[in-house]
Image (tube, helix red, strand yellow):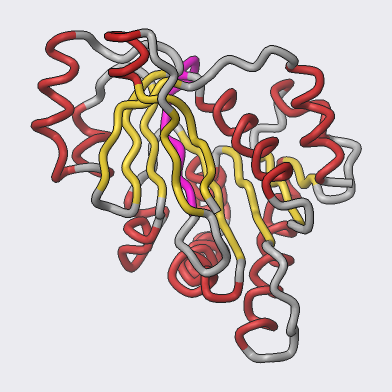
Amino acid sequence: MEFSLGYDLVAWQNYGIKKKIVTDISAGTNSHMLINGSSGSGKTYLQSQLFAKLTQADTESVFYFADYKQDDSYEHLRSQARYFGYENTLKALDIVYGTMKARIAGEDKTRHQVTLIWDEYAANVLALYNEDKKKAEEVMRKVSEILMLARSVCVRLIVSCQIAFASSFPQGSRLNFGVICILGGFNKGIYEMLMPEYMDKVKQRVQQRDFGKGEGSILLQSSELHFIKVGEVTDIAKMERTCKFALK
């Protein structure tokens, strides 16, 4: 099942062509997604778009939303049953992790897609680590298991963060994202962490023109690099209603 992530930035800027960047989100494929970007990079905008489009691509999917910051960005979701804000984010993780474990054990025979979207995951783990180191390590272990094992039983993880610290993804689990997107101005440290093999290509690009809001790099299946332009949503209210409905 082809899924549109955004538009090819080169085709957009050089030729005015809206060429879609697509990835396969069919059952069993690696469709875990990591979105990295500083404040104002367009990270939240992209995450909301992907959320809305995923609900439309597969109407049988079940979504859970963990919102650590619980700021105004996702205020429209707060009343929904599968929204978990601030101190409740770990409840969403436990539900999704439990689903994965039950499916692997053969106790749950269902295979509809289950997706956990976790906004500001790295900040959530860091704060937890400062309060309760053992609990934080348990959370990271569960996230690692989901990244390494869950795709075979149709469980997907989408996380966003300002800095995707390696320590937040132990045992190299960060490498198990099928889609890695870095938005906003070039940051050497971020690219060295997430796309080290493509540093030279990205540097060549930013020497011509740095990335603006809603622009950046996207790596598919650890082997296919694109420069991405996040599309504009003409009806924000409709997008918010779509996401809200998915969490009822």
Q: Position of residue 195 (x, y in %)?
A: 23, 42
- Whether residue 40 is in magenta: the answer is yes
The residue at the point 89 percent across, 46 percent down is 248
Which residue: 28% across, 44% down?
Answer: 194
Camera-side residue: 71 or 76?
Answer: 76
Q: Is residue 130 visible?
A: no
User: Is residue 174 one of those drawn in magenta?
Assistant: no
29 horizontally vs 115: left or right: left
Residue 133 vs 89, above or below: the answer is: below
In the image, which residues are magenta? Answer: 32-41
Horizontal side of residue 220 vs 107, given as left or right: left
Give residue 16's position: percent from left, percent from top: 38, 8
Q: Residue at x 43, y 25 (%)?
A: 7
How far from the left and from the top, in percent, is residue 70? 71, 32
In depth, the one of 91 and 227 nearer the eye is 227
Q: How many marks?
A: 0
Task: Judge by depth and name the residue closer to the eye, 85 or 18.
Answer: 18
Q: For residue 61, what is the image quadrant?
A: bottom right
177 in relation to 83, above or below: below
Residue 145 placement, left or right of 224:
right
Compared to residue 224, the image places residue 136 above or below, namely below
Q: Nearer the viewer, residue 236 or 22?
A: 22
Q: Position of residue 149 (x, y in %)?
A: 48, 74
Q: Is residue 124 left or right of residue 169?
A: right
